[in-house]
Amino acid sequence: MLRTDTAVTVYRKDYTPPAFAIESVELAFDLDPRRTVVTSTMRFTRRQADAPLTLAGEALELVGIRLDGQPFDAYRLDDGDLTLTGLPASGTLEIVSACNPAANTTLSGLYVSNGNFFTQCEAEGFRRITWFLDRPDVMAVYRVTLRADKTAYPVLLSNGNLVAERDLDGGRHEAVWEDPFPKPSYLFAIVAGKLQCIEERITTGSGKEKLLQVWVEPQDLDKTRHAMDSLIHAIRWDEQRFGLELDLDRFMIVAVGDFNMGAMENKGLNIFNTKYVLANAATATDADFFNIESVVGHEYFHNWTGNRVTCRDWFQLSLKEGLTVFRDQEFSADMMAAAEIDDAGDGSSARAVKRIEDVRVLRQVQFPEDAGPMAHPVRPDSYEEINNFYTVTVYEKGAEVVRMYQTLLGRDGFRKGMDLYFQRHDGQAVTCDDFRAAMADANGRDLTQFGRWYSQAGTPVVTVHTEWDATSGTFTLKLAQQCPKVGIETRPGTPDKQPFHIPFAIGLLGADGKDLPLQLDGEAMPSGTTRVLDFTEASQSFRFVGLPKGPRAPLPSLLRDFSAPVIVDADYSDEELTFLLAHDSDPFNRWEAGQRLATRALLKLVGDVQAGRELELDRGLIGAFRSVLTDTSLSPAFREQALMLPAEGYLAERMSVADPAAIHRARQFMRAGLARALQTDWLAAYEENATTGPYTPDPISAGKRALRNLALGYLVETQAEAMYALAGQQYQQADNMTDRFAALAALVNNFAPGREAALADFYQRFEQDPLVVDKWFSLQGMQRGDVGPHAGKRTIDTVRALMQHPAFTLRNPNRARALIFSFCSGNPAQFHLEDGSGYAFWAEQVLALDAINPQVAARLARALDRWQKYTPPLREGMRAALERVAASDKLSRDVREIVGKALSAASA
Ligand code: TRP
Ligand code: ZN
């Protein structure tokens, strides 16, 4: 359905409690794909004298209303909303409505996917099922009756416990579900269709038996084991780390192929994108296995952080999302560390690998968001469409904010804060301030200033200067922080920004590369080798005393383990970075030093490309790479992270005017140079890191495959026949998707002679498996366009041809993301061609998608957020494309907000 929405801005300051409470809801569904009839029976209580009751509704047909059993007609319908007047202080309201799930392409509300019924209610999808107070601070208990044809829909699921089942006349059947826990409407769910499950029974810490199920289409049953194992691990972990138990008797996961995001934490009935459930060795990569564990954990952890304690309003979204992302990050880190400890390590390198991956996402996606037209605080102050605020800022930066509590209070202090949070707020809908108060009160700490992390947007830049007094052995660290206004903060009338409370972790390295004991001025004696400094002023000095005297100053290791989401501006020399890369006891900062070195060298090459100078690869960088590659005391997983070059998008952000073509040339030059210079070392790494025995996705073997396949990628980059053959052989002989796909990617990206045959072979092998076909599309959307004799070949032409492929459809979000998003957001050099071909394609696809699925269209629309950062011809091309989309008279509210904000930033 096409909508033309006018922009209405919702403000956090306008929050008012609901005029009515709805204590209980009975819902009866007569399921039919074209016309499903829903009967909703609500017990309500008035909370404000005289107020009318306005219920939200969207795309619904009204069949009838009764109050306390009598027909009721004191109502008004406008723009979907249903306003009832003259209601008593309490009563029972029955509303019968109808909707059309088969025609619902938005995938919000009740919809049909591959012949089965599913729902998605967060954030505001419940109003597409029935009229309701569709806001998270209205919590009710639900009883749900599902009726449907028994042959077409043998399985009928909803939240909570199954209380009755029976057959009905006419080949139909019925199931009744009850969820004993009061919940907001966004956590409601039903599923109906031809599904099968694997199940397990487990006993929780307190001795209660629970039933766990993973539901999928029959052909996918052999891909559910890993999701089930992940769920069991998540349940155990939450018991151990946070003392939180599963509260329902039954917990279900259901996979669906058409889904707007990753997964959804509906109470007792999590619904997942198939991408985050289905996996076996032949079809899923190590990364897929890893992501499944993390998303299964994430949704499970929401049962406490999100469901038992929920959000008062959608501005508080990070209350549940930031906290739950932090919890899933810690879960993954603990799982990886456990595997490393079993393998005779101490777990620290595995933890660092997880931290590096998370920080990489933060820098590549969240930092740009925080510097662009959609910049917003972790707790936004306004929105036009709430679906646009499920962002990396709310999720990933929100998780960093939660992590900072743990850094400031320690693990035990953080746990005390969590305990107090549940003690105070179990069963309530609360705010980010309530969470902060629990952390502060449980620890007797003043976290007032820390609250600015919730109210101010932007990435603070911390500038570091140091002084060394050789005669007294005193090292002075001078920190200054800056965070200019960004995004919506630049509008007139916004208050000036104040300094953040930054937990700044630091260590000092001596000449031998070992950590020095730390003693701050005023302390009686040294203690520890890493200190978390409370950096709270605009500029502040910290004096470390009692250090070994002499001309050589200690070398600071700054922001260890990335203790705050800031940019550290420090003028290390190449020699100092090489030293940190070799010696820092903080593995995160070893990686960081390598990234700084590579970034510096790359940005210099970019300048050389732009100036038409001859390119030359820095000797020192080659040496640093060789030392990492050949240092077998480092885990393969860590080495792979350290040897991966900074992404093109990250480099673009580091330039004042981004030039994607020059960045790509420079980065390719460095890749090819490192490939040739270290050829024998890459080959050795390739051979040494072969895994033996049957495939398992454990982090140790996955780390070996990661390094081996990184090596393969570099080796094929040499364009040598023998290396093409090596990749071809790995492609053919692989017994798992990780190795097969890595080999395919190496062949495709380097335009190897066997490229077309391998692509065709891959499609043929896996055409029955949608998730693998997605990989096939995505690889081609991201492929390079300018290698050797193929220089000038445009990826856009391949992408347009693939849009005509019989397996392509815009209606399936995974498929659209696989081809279109991978090209527009994952292939900067080819997307930003100066001929504007990428931008024209973007505009077409945003408009086409918007008519089908506004949420997905709005995500694609964000690909042009940073248009002002590019060279003039690109900037103008993007502005024209944005204006073309903005000129459409049938835009959704979702897309209108994104392009509107992008264009209005032009004048700022
Ligand atoms: N709350 C979900 C999560 O983070 C994500 C989510 C929000 C979502 N809105 C959605 C998923 C819409 C699908 C569709 O786990
Ligand atoms: Zn979540």
Image (cartoon, rainbow, N blue to C red):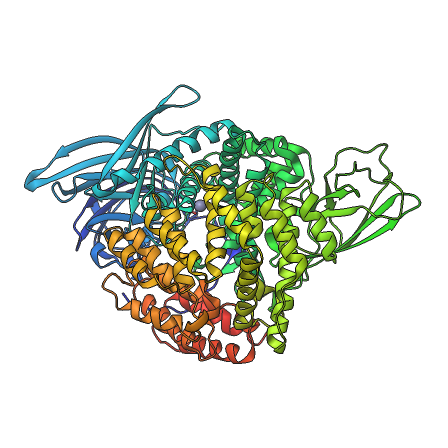
Residue 105 % position (x, y): 27, 59
Query: Furthest residue to the left?
Result: 170
- Looking at the image, residue 24 sits to the left or right of residue 669; the answer is left
Q: Quadrant of residue 34?
A: bottom left
- Looking at the image, residue 372 sits to the left or right of residue 763; the answer is right
Q: Is residue 378 visible?
A: no
Residue 96 % position (x, y): 22, 50
Residue found at x 47% / y 71%: 900
- Looking at the image, residue 436 sits to the left or right of residue 158; the answer is right
Query: Furthest residue to the front?
Result: 722
Q: Name the quadrant of the C terminus.
A: bottom right
Residue found at x 36% / y 35%: 694
Nearer-the-camera pick, 409 or 533 = 533
Q: Name the quadrant of the N terminus.
A: bottom left
Q: Is residue 40 visible?
A: yes
Residue found at x 61% / y 33%: 411
Residue 112 % position (x, y): 23, 52
Nearer-the-camera pick, 364 or 849 = 364
Quarter of the picture for ligand 2? top left
Asked if residue 113 is positioned above or below residue 166 in the image, the reply reads below
Nearer-the-camera pick, 544 or 413 = 544
Query: Furthest residue to the right?
Result: 471
Asked if residue 800 is positioned above or below residue 150 in the image, the reply reads below
Residue 381 % position (x, y): 54, 57
- Looking at the image, residue 302 sits to the left or right of residue 518; the answer is left
Instruction: Report the number of discs.
Output: 0
Query: Furthest residue to the top?
Result: 207
